[in-house]
């Protein structure tokens, strides 16, 4: 107890006295033009761009924070009645060293030469967009919510559709690039109807720019950003003045047609069928701040398959949302908490709609969603209906979300969800939640939520959840402390609950960063300690983990992480950890220690390697776990990634091995046409999976898709096989 008091006191002290990081005062003006530039990547020779003065003065974030960038970058911004234009020229003395690692849409841009800019179109430091490209001209875009907070440069905190950064959102826009003997340039054309903003005549937007100069491992920004943040942090942006966008009125209609051949072969039977289907998505702009999405007979055949996971505990796994319809403004509906391993509690989880517990698709009849901003109030409405399948009844899903944005990264909001199972005597599940955040200075905040659920046959007095957290993200210290309590009958059926049955959780983090000068090539040291503790409501200590670690990041791009975990697992009943061998972990409390080691090579190389290892105690026995990953690229067209997760577990009740192999192969003909194969085998379920996709996109929302899926069950030899071949075409009508 004494050590816990010391940890809590240290966290609170650091939060209270963390230094503020004042936002930058950089500003620039957008220039209104009559003649549009030709979007071909040729910035230097274009007569429109020649008339506009550039902004320069980029500042390093890495490796030498605060120093001017080694090589010059210039940016110009213009607009006309319909479009927003931006040009960037990234000068380099050695254009032959420009690194292009990938040419797929939304490929990560931090391991290659790239340019990204962000727009805070409501100028509220809360919601925005990111657009970017590499020297090959890929399209990279994302939505930013929650101020872009907790997006770490080292990728440890909140991201995904429910986090602060939604890379799965795709807008309709254009970019072209050009490489010459002075460097490389890019031109962006973004229709105003792709963006959401307020209705003022003359507006100011938040704006910032990032350049990655990969050959020298340099990251620089126009409006400087401290080392612990990314370009997506909206409060660190500069100001773009004199924007005069139109009041957006836009209708998009995206019909699709699909042909699918399904086959199944097993030991006793064989079945084949061919289906043809169709449907549509629609998007209607209501003013410049609201968007109405409509869908009928919704289909997600083109969505990438889930990555399989090995589960060696007794709690639910979290899989991210990848379906396009649910991704725009997804962060608005996010109420709950997120750890870097995924959400633990969420009032709304869109995968509950149209996907069953086994990951199979459930047909969606249709639905509507209204999202956007009214008088500085964020509004979200959703209503969707699924078809009945076998014993599963037709379900109605309804959500109301309100969120009032307040100054200094603060907000207060409410959410109501309602699930009605129409075929089960109109069984319903309701959740009502309230969430809030109070920003303190520019690096600290207090946030939390409270919620209740209503479910037939469950005690409403025990159907509650709440969380309170204080955190600070300073230049040298990042700290957090939180308390969560979940009632034993809390049941968010439209959401996600990793642990059911009720618990209390304490969490604390002390994370530090140091950048020594001229010390053995070390760029940054990140010693830190985390604690997660779960107790049942009756006081039983269910799980505890004290994590002590240090990260060493080298200027060369290599990283080494070394850590030790002190763990406790309490079981109130026997746990079948490996059903294939009927291996049981008996009811008891287990204390053990494990060490972990992580190593990665520079991601900018054509060949990169990383591995995470765990060695130590495990439920009264021992475990050795290793997860190596290899990435190989051939030129800028072909990329491959090979991953393996292996566990050697030795318990008093028996020994077993698990392994999960994953191969991802991608060939890009150009940024809009590529082939991708995802091949997986999981010995825990004795299943192999193949997802093969050929994609030819006309726009972000339409194109031609050819998809092949195959699953095989193994019992020494293949016993059951199911496969499907899908041909889909969708077309965007933009009015």
Image (cartoon, helix red, strand yellow):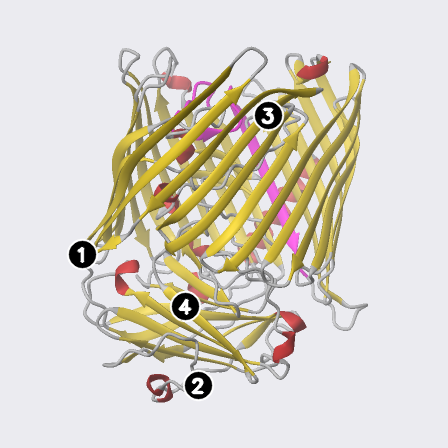
- The segment highlighted magenta reads 487-513
Q: Mark 4 Cα within 10 Å, few/some/many (few <14, many 20+)?
A: many
Q: Which picture quadrant has residue 273?
A: top left
Give the structural element (helix, strand or loop) at label 3: strand
CA distance for labels 2 and 4: 16 Å
Query: Which residue lies at the image location 55% right of the left edge and 61% below the top edge?
Result: 109
Residue identified by numbered label 3:
712
**Quadrant position of the C terminus in the picture:** bottom left
Give the structural element (helix, strand or loop) at label 1: loop
Q: In this view, does 395 lie above or below 143?
A: above
Q: Foreground residue, 296 or 289?
A: 296
CA distance for labels 3 and 4: 41 Å
CA distance for labels 1 and 3: 50 Å
Residue identified by numbered label 1:
287
**Quadrant position of the N terminus in the picture:** top right
Q: In the rendered structure, are the residues bearing label 2 and label 1 in contact, judged by CB atoms less than 8 Å apart?
A: no
Label placed on residue 175:
4
- Specify which label sits upstream in the sequence, 3 or 2: 2
């Amino acid at each position: 107890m004494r050590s816990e008091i010391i940890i809590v006191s240290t966290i609170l002290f650091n939060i209270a006295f963390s230094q503020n990081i004042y936002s930058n005062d950089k500003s620039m003006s957008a220039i209104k033009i009559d003649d549009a530039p030709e979007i071909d990547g040729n910035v230097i020779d274009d007569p429109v761009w020649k008339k506009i003065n550039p902004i320069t003065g980029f500042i390093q974030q890495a490796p030498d924070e605060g120093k001017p960038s080694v090589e010059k970058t210039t940016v110009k911004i213009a607009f006309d009645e319909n479009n927003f234009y931006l040009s960037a020229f990234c000068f380099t003395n050695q254009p032959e060293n420009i690194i292009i690692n990938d040419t797929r849409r939304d490929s990560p841009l931090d391991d290659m030469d790239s340019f990204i800019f962000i727009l805070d179109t409501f100028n509220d430091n809360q919601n925005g967009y990111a657009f970017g490209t590499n020297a090959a001209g890929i399209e990279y875009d994302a939505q930013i919510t929650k101020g872009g907070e907790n997006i770490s440069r080292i990728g440890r905190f909140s991201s995904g559709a429910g986090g602060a950064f939604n890379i799965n959102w795709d807008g309709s826009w254009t970019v072209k690039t050009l490489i010459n003997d002075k460097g490389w340039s890019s031109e962006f054309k973004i229709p105003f109807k792709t963006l959401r903003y307020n209705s003022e005549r003359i507006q100011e937007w938040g704006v910032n720019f990032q350049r990655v100069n990969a050959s020298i491992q340099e990251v620089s920004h126009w409006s400087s950003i401290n080392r612990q943040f990314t370009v997506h942090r909206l409060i660190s942006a500069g100001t773009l003045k004199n924007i005069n966008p139109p009041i957006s009125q836009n209708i998009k209609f995206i019909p699709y047609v699909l042909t699918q051949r399904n086959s199944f072969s097993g030991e006793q039977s064989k079945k084949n069928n061919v289906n043809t289907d169709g449907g549509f998505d629609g998007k209607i702009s209501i003013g410049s701040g609201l968007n109405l999405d409509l869908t009928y007979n919704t289909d997600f055949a083109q969505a990438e398959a889930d990555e399989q996971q090995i589960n060696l505990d007794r709690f639910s796994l979290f899989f991210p949302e990848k379906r396009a319809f649910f991704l725009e403004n997804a962060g608005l509906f996010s109420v709950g908490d997120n750890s870097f391993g995924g959400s633990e509690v969420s009032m709304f989880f869109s995968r509950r709609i149209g996907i069953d517990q086994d990951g199979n698709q459930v047909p969606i009849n249709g639905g509507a969603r209204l999202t956007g901003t009214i008088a500085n109030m964020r509004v979200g409405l959703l209503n969707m209906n699924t078809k009945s399948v076998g014993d599963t009844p037709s379900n109605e899903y309804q959500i109301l979300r309100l969120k009032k944005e307040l100054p200094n990264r603060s907000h207060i909001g409410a959410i109501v969800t309602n699930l009605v199972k129409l075929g089960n005597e109109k069984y319903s599940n309701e959740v009502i939640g309230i969430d809030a955040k109070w920003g303190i200075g520019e690096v600290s905040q207090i946030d939390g939520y409270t919620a209740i659920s209503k479910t037939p046959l469950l005690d409403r007095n025990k159907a509650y959840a709440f969380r309170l957290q204080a955190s600070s993200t300073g230049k040298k210290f990042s700290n957090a402390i939180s308390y969560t309590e979940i009632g034993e009958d809390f049941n968010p059926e439209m959401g996600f609950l990793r642990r059911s049955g009720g618990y209390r959780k304490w969490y604390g983090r002390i994370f530090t960063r140091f950048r020594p000068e001229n010390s053995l090539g070390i760029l940054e040291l990140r010693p830190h300690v985390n604690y997660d503790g779960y107790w049942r409501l009756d006081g039983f200590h269910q799980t505890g983990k004290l994590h002590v670690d240090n990260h060493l990041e080298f200027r060369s791009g290599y990283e080494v992480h070394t850590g030790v975990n002190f763990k406790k697992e309490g079981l109130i009943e026997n746990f079948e950890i490996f059903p294939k061998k009927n291996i049981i972990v008996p009811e008891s409390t287990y204390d053990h220690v494990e060490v972990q080691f992580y190593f990665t090579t520079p991601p900018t190389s054509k060949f990169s390697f990383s591995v995470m290892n765990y060695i130590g105690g495990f439920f009264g026995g021992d475990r050795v776990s290793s997860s190596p990953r290899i990435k190989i690229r051939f030129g800028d067209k072909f990329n491959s990634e090979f991953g393996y997760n292996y566990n050697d577990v030795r318990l008093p009740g028996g020994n077993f091995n698990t392994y999960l192999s994953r191969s991802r192969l991608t060939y890009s003909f150009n940024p809009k046409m590529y082939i991708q194969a995802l091949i997986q085998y999981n010995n825990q379920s004795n299943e192999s999976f193949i997802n093969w996709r050929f994609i030819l996109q006309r726009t972000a929302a339409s194109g031609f898709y050819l998809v092949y899926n195959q699953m095989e069950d193994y019992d020494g030899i293949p016993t059951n096989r199911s496969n499907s071949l899908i041909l889909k075409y969708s077309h965007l009508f933009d009015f």
